[in-house]
Amino acid sequence: MTATQIPADELATLATDIWDWRARQQPVLGDDIPRLPRPSGWLPDFSPEAVNRARQRRDELTARWRVLDVRDLDVAAQIDHRLLGSV
């Protein structure tokens, strides 16, 4: 894939999609501290099929992140882009 120029709102959309994926994948912890709001009706699912779907979605999000050319965006957006790549 080659890099493409993007508007800042596309970066924001990707950030929302990554956060949603992360919220669905973060495991339940043994304490009662709410670290992340869960989607309505969320239940942990670590079946082979669910893990495969999560990996496929992760790979899709990573591919979307990699093709973003943020050089012409402001520094804050470029930092956001780098942070998204670390998730």
Image (cartoon, rainbow, N blue to C red):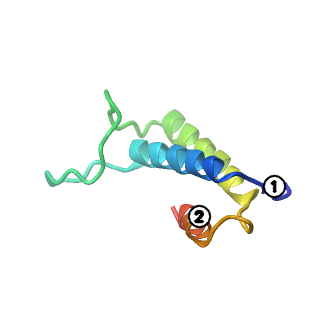
Residue highlighted by disc 1: 4
Q: Around disc 1, counting alpha carbons within 10 Å, would you say few (fewer than 14), some (14 to 19), or many (20 or more)?
A: few
Q: Which of the pair 11/51 is nearer the observer?
A: 11
* Residue plotted at (65% across, 54% down): 62
Name the residue at the right extreme.
Answer: 2
Residue 52 placement (x, y as % from top left): 57, 40
Establish if 21 lies above or below 50.
below
Q: Which of the pair 47/69 is nearer the observer?
A: 69
Residue 28 placement (x, y as % from top left): 28, 48
* Residue plotted at (38% across, 50% down): 26
Residue highlighted by disc 2: 77
Q: Around disc 2, counting alpha carbons within 10 Å, would you say few (fewer than 14), some (14 to 19), or many (20 or more)?
A: some
* Residue plotted at (65% across, 47% down): 10
Residue type at mark 1 is Thr
Please, what secondary structure does the residue beneath circle 1 have?
Answer: strand
Residue type at mark 2 is Ala
- Asked which quadrant contains residue 23, the reply is top left
- Asked which quadrant contains residue 39, the reply is top left
Residue 24 placement (x, y as % from top left): 41, 41
- Along the horizontal axis of the image, is 26 left or right of 17? left
Please, what secondary structure does the residue beneath circle 2 have?
Answer: helix
Work out which quarter of the rendered image holds the N terminus and state it. bottom right
